[in-house]
Image (cartoon, rainbow, N blue to C red):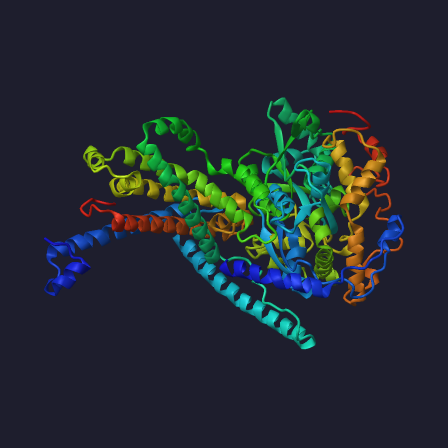
Amino acid sequence: MNRRQVFKGLIFTPLALAMTLAGCGKEAPKEASTPAAEMAAPVTAGTIGPAEKPDLKFGFIKLTDMAPLAVAYEKRFFEDEGLYVTLEAQANWKVLLDRVIDGQLDGAHMLAGQPLGATIGFGTKADIITAFSMDLNGNGITVSNAVWEDMKKHIPMGSDGKPVHPIKADYLKPVVEAYKKAGKPFKMGMVFPVSTHNYELRYWLAAGGIHPGYYAPDKGDTSGQIKADALLSVTPPPQMPATMEAGTIHGYCVGEPWNQQAVFKGIGVPVITDYEIWKNNPEKVFGVSQAWADKNPNTHIRVVKAMIRAAKWLDENNNANRPEAVNILSKPNYVGADEAVIANSMTGTFEYEKGDKRAVPDFNVFFRHNATYPYYSDAVWYLSQMRRWGQIAEAKPDSWYMDMAKKVYRPDIYAQAAQALIAEGKMSATDFPNFVTETGFKPPQSEFIDNITFDGSKPNAYLEQFKIGLKGSAKP
Amino acid sequence: MKALTLSSISQNPGRLKPTPAQLAKLGRAVLLPLIAISLFLFLWYNAAKLIDTSLGQFPGPAEVWEQSTNLVTEHQQERQREVAFVARQEVRNAQILARNPEADVQIRPYTGKPTFIDQVGTSLITVLSGFLLASLIAIPLGILIGLNESVYTAVNPLIQLFKPVSPLAWLPLVTMVVSAVYVSDDPAFSKSFITSMLTVLLCCLWPTVINTAVGVSNVSKDLLNVSQVLRLPVLTHVFKIIVPASLPLMFTGLRLSLGIAWMVLIAAEMLAQSPGLGKFVWDEFQNGSSNSLGRIMVAVLVIGFIGFLLDRSMLFLQRSVSWDKSAVLR
């Protein structure tokens, strides 16, 4: 501790000196206004200047998808970029976000909805941006043993005697109805109001005809339980198994290792993974405050470079490095859960009912399918779901969605990092999308559990397709 | 019969051989706690085996011992990694200097995680700073309140209002104030340290204030009369009459405050994310591994042991400062 204080004094002067000596910053020229042209702004080799702030502190939550951060540290990708990074686990998502906003953390492992929620002002208002998507998929929905027994009566069995997957919420609906008739509230947990888990759980419930509740922030109601059949509330991930065991909640949606923990300890049954709800959905991002990014552009690009390399390492050679990643993550200062619990999902299997292990090779995707690219259409999906459930209180035109997405998601910074890596020979152009033609919008996607097609350029039209959810200028 | 102390031995070396009565006394002082502790360990071992839930088995003495050795090993491994980290930097710096002998190079501080032993250190520093600062405020305040009846009547409701407030209730407010006010490009202390320290201060202030006030207001009438007769100036009156007379109660307050400070710190660290023992417990809880409960138990025992040491240090301080050597101090 004392050393740190002394070094801080020693660092400040030579750093200022080094900055003036070095002098060169990034030289990417800003040209045309179309997104493709902006992202195609060429960066010649070696023009990313030295990091303005080499000593960094990043926060994370103990979930397996913080892996790119752990790998970038342990494999020294951060050190290769001249960055000295300290990784610190945070108590919960709110504390993590607050610490990024007030500068105690330089950046953090964040839910894909957090930068968006913060920028639009749902929760603490602050300008947060992201230039790196940390992974795809990785969540599951688990229900308690009692609920599973009731559900099983309605689920069709396959010829092998095992339940047919994916298990839709249609089979949960009779159970929820029974609870309502008996006067018992059906409660479920998710990790944060703007979390991917919240939206995926609501999507799954709504697709099965169960109403997950509306928010009415303009009336001061941020419980999200208006008109709900199933009452959703926030529970921190490590407390979810205990809370479900105690009967306070009957199910939850969370990332790993908390679904497999429930199976290992015999207190619940995962029924579906988010891979089956929306194939290859965006999950976590690396978020920084806008102010920090403006002040430290080179540092930001270097951080993204190190993390791209880490993501690639995680998916390399058909997931060959995953066992080593599991070993790193099981250390108490990272995820800390037992290796066996983490190993399942990270190495491509997922255990549903005890003994029912199925192959889900893309349960965690870190680099394949352009997982690290921050697509605007992903941002638009989250914004559309925020509107669907009332977190965005009024109807907004399509252009508003586009503007918000472009403000928060920054593929231009990603492109600079990627091109620097290509120029250094560490990665090849085929690893990345074609930056010249990429618009940031994926083509319309239909691999959702309810087969509704999502076109990122038409969010309001998308919202019209849902049976449950706010449309147009409706209010809860 | 003189007690068998070091001073008595040095004065009269012939007395080195203890009498049977002295032996019995010593034996009682050592054996009775030992028996109690052994009994407790036996009960703990058996009870732990019985508490086996789906969320894990309650850690017994053997597990706790195993985990404490693990923690020490981890600390040593981390120190080795630090050595390797510095060595890598030296290599890099040598390369930079080879290209450009004028370049400014330095060895950056280690970026790895703080180990259990580092966290104990952080907690101790935080609790002592919070306690010292609180005492600096509480003792003068207590003296003022004790001396003056009207000040006491005025301030008492406020003290009673703030005394029961839990640290976790103060924490969001303190965090907000610290974030807004403590803004600096190159801070000497981290915000989480300041937040934890201030929370500790707000909660452990009150016993010292109250006990000091009571002690001051109960100074013997004879002593007050002496002061009046001699027409002592106010400061002399305070330092020569009031403070020595109210020391016993003041120290009672200080000991209570230190105990509360230590308890509050653990809770505050969990949420303020200051890298101390509280954070260790919270992180282990979040880990949910099969070792976690054992490690949390180690932390519980260490917290208790340090609390015990802190209390004994205060007692030692009280004994050395107190003028009444015949008073019984436990």
Q: Is residue A289 visible?
A: no
Q: Which residue is painted at 30% across and 43% down in the image?
A: B251
Location of residue B34 in the rendering, given as x and y in whole percent from the top left corner:
27, 53
Q: Can residue A380 be seen in this view?
A: yes
Q: Which residue is painted at 80% across and 26% down in the image?
A: A473
Residue at the far bottom in the pictured view: B98
Left or right: A302 in relation to B66: right
Q: Which residue is painted at 47% across and 45% down in the image?
A: B197
Left or right: A467 in relation to A217: right
Left or right: A394 in relation to A1: right
| Quarter of the C terminus of chain B within the rendering | top left
Location of residue A326 in the rendering, given as x and y in whole percent from the top left corner:
62, 58
- Residue A7 lies, with reference to residue A281, above or below; the image says below
- Residue A51 lies, with reference to residue A124, above or below; the image says below
Location of residue A344 in the rendering, given as x and y in whole percent from the top left corner:
64, 53
Count every numbered label the image shows and give the total. Answer: 0
- In which quarter of the view is residue A334 placed? bottom right
Location of residue A423 in the rendering, given as x and y in whole percent from the top left corner:
81, 65
Nearest the camera: A356 or A404? A404
- Residue A98 lies, with reference to residue B224, above or below; the image says below
- Residue B87 lies, with reference to residue B264, above or below; the image says below
Nearest the camera: B262 or B194? B194
